[in-house]
Amino acid sequence: MSLVSVAACDTYTLEQVRQRITAVLAPLGGIARFVRPGMRVLLKPNLLAATGPEHAVTTHPTVVQAVAELVQQAGGVVWIGDSPAGPSGQYRHVWHKSGMTDVAAHTGATLVPFDGVIWKRLNGRDYLLARPVFDADVVINLPKLKTHTLVLYTGAVKNLFGAIPGTRKRELHLHAPGVREFSQVLVDTLALVRPALTLMDGILGQEGNGPGVGGTPRRYGCLLAATDPVALDTVASRALGYRPGEVLHLALAGDRGLGCSEFDAITLEGDRDVLDFGQVALPRTRWYFNAPSWTGNLVSRMVRVRPRLNEGLCVSCGRCVEACPAGAITLGQRPDFALARCIRCFCCAEVCPQGAITPHRNLFARLLEL
Ligand code: SF4
Ligand code: SF4
């Protein structure tokens, strides 16, 4: 039976975070269960983009620091690494903005760029994964609790997609354009990476049209930990308000035996009352990506969600152009979207530092939703 441990934690003061992380790990056997002296331990936070902790896009530096300290107390050597969305070569900027440079300075941890790759093949697809993921003796997954415009929820399993460096992510989006195909890619990534431990930063997460700056920060006040990332996500996504099976990659991971996606088969330990989040704003794409099969292909084709630009917010930085896997955006004075090429992956919205791109439903989609 999968065990998910929950601890209430309502601030990012280092003392409280240290104390609550120790508490949340206790039912799992504490850090010593996972780290032995001399082990190289890769901490894999969510470092999606170069944004400050106040946007709740990236795992908070205080959480990363507290885990790094625990690993070091257990005798482990700490590496911190992730691959941001968009092109590679932006590591230093992302580390600086997200607070990881300070974490490294405070702890002596090593920040590792995800440049070199190891090739794996699974289910007919080629995966190029960051070498440090396999050079480390153990991977500790440190996701952020957020909603996600494409796959509805981003947490433990989705965070592992960051093990695929830079532009390789774009290729996978292009070759797995629909939610079902992309969810299979996420499950493949889980099968290849297999973290020993997941600890989720749910103190300040996101709701709405996450996971980038377009999402709305929301205080959930919790930390979650588990050895089974699927079970952890099943608990967290249910707390957000998703129905069983609605987050497709969790259902698929459960079907493939990679974790437990049945809420009733999961044991919850700790401050479970903190998971009563109340009403959470879910992504605008929720209904569209989950249209029941009886609506058929015709309705699916008529119901459209597309990226929409808020020109007043755009600063013409061109990051959306670099991130678009389909080459559907060109940059003149402002980005121009060739919607015939668009695969609705919303990578552009993920990387936009201004939150200038949001999902827009056509009239038919809005009428159906009503
Ligand atoms: S939409 Fe966002 S990412 Fe694209 S050019 Fe404008 S500010 Fe940059
Ligand atoms: S325009 Fe945006 S949503 Fe469309 S394919 Fe490009 S990145 Fe994806």
Image (tube, helix red, strand yellow):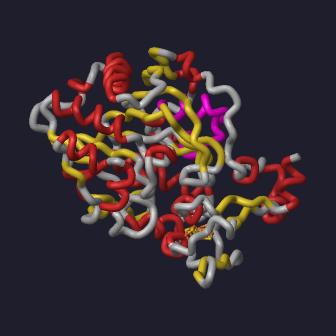
Residue 137 visible at all: no
Magenta segment: does it hold 235?
yes
Q: Relative to residue 340, is residue 307 depicted above or below? A: above
Q: Percent position (x, y) of residue 48?
A: 44, 54
Q: Relative to residue 280, is residue 222 depicted above or below? A: above
What residue sits 68% from the left and 42% below the top?
A: 282
What residue sits 32% from the left and 17% below the top?
A: 26
- Compared across the picture, whether 313 is left or right of 125 comes to right
Magenta segment: does it hold 313?
no
Residue situated in front as seen by the camera: 128 or 239:
239
Q: Relative to residue 282, is residue 111 depicted above or below? A: below
Residue 275 visible at all: yes
Q: Relative to residue 328, is residue 90 depicted above or below? A: above
Name which quarter of the figure residue 309 lies in. Answer: bottom right
Name which quarter of the figure residue 313 lies in. Answer: bottom right
SS majority, magenta: helix
Looking at the rendering, the stretch of residues picked out in magenta corresponds to: 231-250
- Compared across the picture, whether 202 is left or right of 17 comes to right
Q: Percent position (x, y) of residue 255?
A: 53, 39
